[in-house]
Image: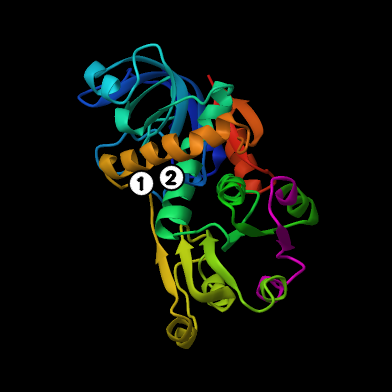
Amino acid sequence: MRAVEITAFGAPEVLRLGERPMPHAGEGEALIRVSASGINRPDVLQRLGHYAPPPGTSDLPGLEVAGVVEGGDEAALSRAGLKLGDRVCALVAGGGYAQWCVAPVEQCLPVPAGLTDIEAASLPETFFTVWSNVFDRGRLQPGETLLVQGGTSGIGVTAIQLARAWGATVIVTAGSDEKCAACLSLGAHHAINYKSQDFVAEVARITAGKGVDVVLDMVAGDYVAREVECLAEDGRLVIIAVQGGVKSAFNAGLVLRRRLTITGSTLRPRPVAFKGAIARALRERVWPMIEEGKVRPVIHSTFEAADAAQAHALMESNQHTGKIVLTW
């Protein structure tokens, strides 16, 4: 099969289309003939040598795919309400940049009615991540307020739509007026240009000094201290990436007085059972929203697999709004 390989750690050009043996599905697994593969920030980190795959996982990048189930554990598929020939999208721990991919059946979901495989391939990584962190870990409730850092990222556009559909007020940050406008068009109630505005002051103004209930943070570093200032009483800060650095200093007195929670998580190394529980929640709670048009995939660009280096260059430029997808 054809696959996009990381030939060395470095710039996007190290990604090359090569040949690999087809994977084989084992117990509890599905073999998927891939038609589209989503691109995510962890793929870039892996290419740079900063995010190794979990032990026993394919060294090929790629955390989400969509295609057709062509083989695998038929009993496990049946238990999951799936069968050979079904169109599915799946979250994987690696190996997604290939024409064939093995995924745990528990991490497979049917392609929502009306969606193309390209649209479906853009769903798993961001939807699993947002559900797990905003709704499970962050405990966002209808009527609360969510602050999303980086509203035009794949995570951002998903968080905006899901939180809005959930009945929350959504505030986002973005790096240009154009990106702020894109966030508003997706359902954000307020958008802050972090390059020209102080998001701490803007959050205080928007919330009349109360603050937000949940912050979804992909930056960390010196953002943490500022986000602590943004949180309302009993607020929750959820860190899911550290693009701004791993070290943070913040006002612990505010944490005490406002009873704040600072937490975080990574999804890739978590066990199949954990991810399977998220998949079941998404199928029950979110897939109907997608099929009803309340939540939609946001695709910025598609690239043929041979052009994976160009796709990574676009992601690193931060000029995109929504997802970037490879096609096979």
Residue 261 spot, x, y in % from top left: 42, 72
Q: Which sits in the foreground, 289 or 313?
A: 289
Q: For the residue carrying disc 1, how many other residues have a C-alpha within 10 Å: few (<14), some (14-19), or many (20+)? A: some
Q: For the residue carrying disc 2, how many other residues have a C-alpha within 10 Å: few (<14), some (14-19), or many (20+)? A: some
User: In this rendering, does residue 63 appear at all?
Assistant: no
Q: Are marks 1 and 2 in contact (CB under 8 Å)?
A: yes
Locate residue 6: give its quadrant.
top left
Answer with mark 1 or mark 2, whichever residue precedes in sequence. 2
Q: Read off the residue under disc 1.
A: 52
In percent of the image, x 63 and y 41: which residue is there? 322
In percent of the image, x 63 and y 58: which residue is there? 170
Dot 2: element: helix
Residue 192 spot, x, y in % from top left: 72, 63
**Coloration mode:** rainbow
Reply yes or no: does residue 200 show up in magenta. Answer: yes
Residue 69 disc label: none
Q: Is residue 59 left or right of residue 289?
A: left
Tell me the kind of residue under disc 1: Ala
Residue 46 disc label: 2
Q: Is residue 297 above or below residue 138?
A: above
Residue 104 spot, x, y in % from top left: 30, 30
Q: Is residue 196 above or below residue 40?
A: below
**Label 1 vs label 2: CA separation?**
6 Å
Tell me the kind of residue under disc 2: Gln
Tell me where the magenta segment starts and ends, as one range: 183-202
Reply yes or no: does residue 50 show up in magenta. Answer: no
Q: Is residue 321 left or right of residue 15?
A: right
Q: Which sits in the foreground, 284 or 5?
A: 284
Q: Which sits in the foreground, 306 or 106?
A: 106
